[in-house]
Image (cartoon, rainbow, N blue to C red):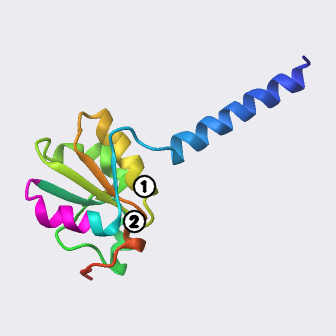
Amino acid sequence: MNYNSIINIVMIVLLVWFVYSRFGGVKGLKNLKPDQFQDELKENRNRILIDVREPGELKQGYIPGAINIPLSRIKQRVREIPANKNVYLYCRSGMRSKQAARILQKNGFRELSHLQGGIMSWRGKLTK
């Protein structure tokens, strides 16, 4: 095997790892469809709802009762999230909420759910 082949293999492995780490599932994260998400928010009073979008994105509307902790700040603000509550996450499309769930799992959170498809899939009420 020549040097170029080894470099190509390493690059492919790194690319696959990157794609999987960004887009792969999160073990233990409940992926809820919009109607399931809405039902759980109504039924579960021991919860916290977190919008992980950036503050400028909130102009488009947010789910009532949500607090904004942007993904870019979640590591610094993780202590603001009560450990004894079920955490419901959402973003624009569902990608950042998965990343936020990974961070929260590493910090000991276990009851994590996210809105599959993000706020783009939401059909419920929005606050502007």
Mark 2: which secondary structure?
helix
Residue at the (14%, 41%) spot, across then down: 83
**Residue farthest toward the left in the current orientation of the protein:** 45
- Residue 52 drawn above or below residue 76: below
Q: Is residue 4 left or right of residue 118?
A: right
Viewport quadrant of the N terminus:
top right
Residue 19 lies within the magenta run = no
Q: Quadrant of residue 106?
A: top left
Marks 2 and 1: which is nearer the front? 2
Q: Position of residue 19 (x, y in %)?
A: 60, 44
Segment colored magenta:
37-46
Q: Earlier in the sequence, mark 2 or mark 1?
A: 1
**Residue farthest toward the top in the current orientation of the protein:** 1
Which residue is identified by label 2?
Answer: 118
Which residue is identified by label 1?
Answer: 96
Q: Position of residue 10 (x, y in %)?
A: 74, 27
Tag 1: residue type?
Arg
Q: Position of residue 7 (x, y in %)?
A: 81, 27
Q: Residues within 10 Å of mark 1 (few under 14, many from 20)?
A: many
**Separation of marks 2 and 1 at Cα, in angstroms:** 9 Å
Mark 1: which secondary structure?
helix
Residue 43 lies within the magenta run = yes
Q: Quadrant of residue 14?
A: top right
- Residue 11 drawn above or below residue 115: above
User: Camera-side residue: 18 or 33?
Assistant: 33
Q: Quadrant of residue 90?
A: bottom left
- Residue 124 drawn above or below residue 36: below
Tag 2: residue type?
Gly
In the rendered structure, are the residues bearing label 2 and label 1 in contact, judged by CB atoms less than 8 Å apart?
Answer: no
User: Camera-side residue: 14 or 113?
Assistant: 113
